[in-house]
Image (spheres, grey):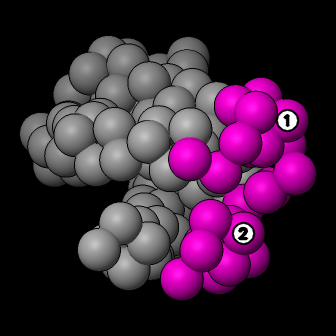
Amino acid sequence: MNVQEFYAAIGGDYKTAVARMMNDDFVKRMLGKFQANNSFDALLNAYRNKDAKSLFEAAHSLKGVSGNLALVDLQSKVGVIVEAVRDYEHVNELNLDGEMRALESAYLLVKSKLEELLK
């Protein structure tokens, strides 16, 4: 799998990624750093613990990383979470189970395809 195929498979924007990072090699290197980002795990943990502040911070971080790498579908799904918790002090007031499942599915797809790309 090459970088362009990766972006097509995960609902990303290859042209934007290359425009920002100049070439496929640099895009691939930055995508490799995505694997080390723990925002998704922090997001899940905060949701389980009903910690709205930590959930917002982790989701906002993941949204930024996803946006910088032009991972459009993932950025869109995490953006829903960011906006849902932006003004809430208590996550238990919200039902984000469906949104969290959609986000997890998109995230796992990116991780899976990223493993293919980087092997």
Q: Nearer the viewer, residue 56 or 50?
A: 56
Q: Is residue 41 left or right of residue 2?
A: left
Can you tell which mark lies on residue 4? 2
Residue 104 colored magenta? Answer: no
Per the rendered image, the range of residues in magenta is 1-25
Look at the picture and state if 28 lies above or below 92: below
Q: Secondary structure at mark 2?
A: helix
Disc 2: CA contacts within 10 A as few (<14), some (14-19) or many (>=20): some
x then y, percent, for residue 4: 72, 69
Residue 17 colored magenta? Answer: yes
Look at the picture and state if 1 lies above or below 29: below
Q: Residue at x 44, y 42 (%)?
A: 29
x then y, percent, for residue 43: 28, 40
Residue 67 visible at all:
no
The residue at which mark 1 appears reads as 19
**Three-letter code, disc 1:** Ala
**Three-letter code, disc 2:** Gln
Q: Residue at x 29, y 74 (%)?
A: 119
